[in-house]
Amino acid sequence: MPLQIVRKDITTMKVDAIVNAANESLLGGGGVDGAIHRAAGPQLLAECRKLGGCRTGQAKITGGYHLPARYVIHTVGPVWRGGSHGERELLVSAYRNALELAVSHDCHTVAFPLISSGVYGYPKEQALKVAVETIEAFLQKHELTVFLVIFDRASWAVVEELFADIASCTGEGHTDGREKQ
Ligand code: ADP
C-alpha cells in the first residue's frame, strides 16, 4: 500500500525516516517538532545545531537517535498568510524535497505529519489535499511506502470528510491506494 493515512503519534513510527515539520532555525519548537526532539533525545538538537537552519520548502536529514526511525528529515512548511503568498508551492516543495532526500538515503518507508497545519495555520483540508496529491504524484515514479500520520482529532475529522467526498464522487470508496486505519 504506497500511501496510507493513519492516526498515530509519529514518534512511535517504525519506519526508515520520519519527517519533522520544523521551523527555519531547526533548533526545535512546539507541536510535532517538540515531540520529535523529546523522543529522540538531546543528540538530535546537537546535530541540528550543525546544519545552519533550513529555508522554507527545503529539507535536511539527521539521525533518529532514540526514535525507532533511522532518520529524521526536517522540512519547513510555509506559514499561512492567506494563500496568495506562494504557500501551496512551498508546501508542495517541502513534501517533494523531503521525499527526494528519503530516496537518496535509501529509505523505503517514510512517515509525514500534516505539515503546516498546526501553528503555521494552513487550512487543514487544503493541507491534506496538498499532502496527498504531492505524495501520490511522487509515488508514480518511486518505490516507497509513505504514511501520512494524523495526530489530532480535528485533522482526523477532515480526513474522514475528504474520504467521504472521494467515495461519493467515485462511488468506489478508497480504492486508489490510500487507506485509513
Ligand atoms: P506547523 O508549524 O508546520 O504547523 P505543528 O507541529 O504545529 O507544525 O503541526 C503540524 C501537525 O502535526 C498538526 O496537525 C499537529 O496536530 C500534528 N502533530 C503534533 N504532534 C504530533 C505527533 N506527535 N505526531 C504526529 N503529528 C503531530
Image (tube, rainbow, N blue to C red):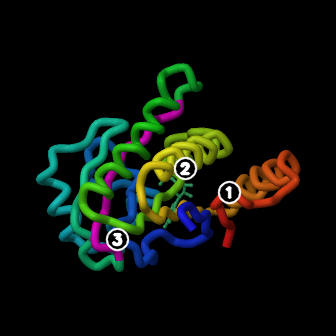
From the viewer's side, name the closer residue of 73 and 144: 144
Which of label 3 and label 2 is nearer to you?
2
Kind of residue sitting beneath label 2: Glu
Q: Residues within 10 Å of mark 1 (few under 14, many from 20)?
A: few
- Quadrant housing the N terminus: bottom right
Q: Are marks 3 and 1 in contact (CB under 8 Å)?
A: no
Residue 69 place in picture, x, y as percent: 34, 74
| Residue beneath disc 1 | 176
The residue located at (57%, 39%) in the rendering is 122
Which numbered tag is attached to residue 136? 2
Distance in Å between CA atoms under marks 3 and 1: 24 Å
Quadrant of residue 3 within the rendered picture: bottom right
The residue located at (31%, 40%) in the rendering is 58
Q: Is residue 89 covered in magenta?
A: no
Which residues fall within the magenta stretch? Answer: 69-80
Q: Are marks 1 and 2 in contact (CB under 8 Å)?
A: yes
Residue extending furthest toward the left: 50
Kind of residue sitting beneath label 3: Asp
Task: Describe the element under mark 3 as helix, strand or loop.
Answer: loop
Q: Residues within 10 Å of mark 2 (few under 14, many from 20)?
A: some
Horizontally, residue 11 falls left or right of residue 41, namely right
Task: Describe the element under mark 2 as helix, strand or loop.
Answer: helix
Which numbered tag is attached to residue 16? 3
Whichever of callouts 1 and 2 sits on the residue coming sooner in the sequence is 2
Whichever of callouts 3 and 1 sits on the residue coming sooner in the sequence is 3
Kind of residue sitting beneath label 1: Asp
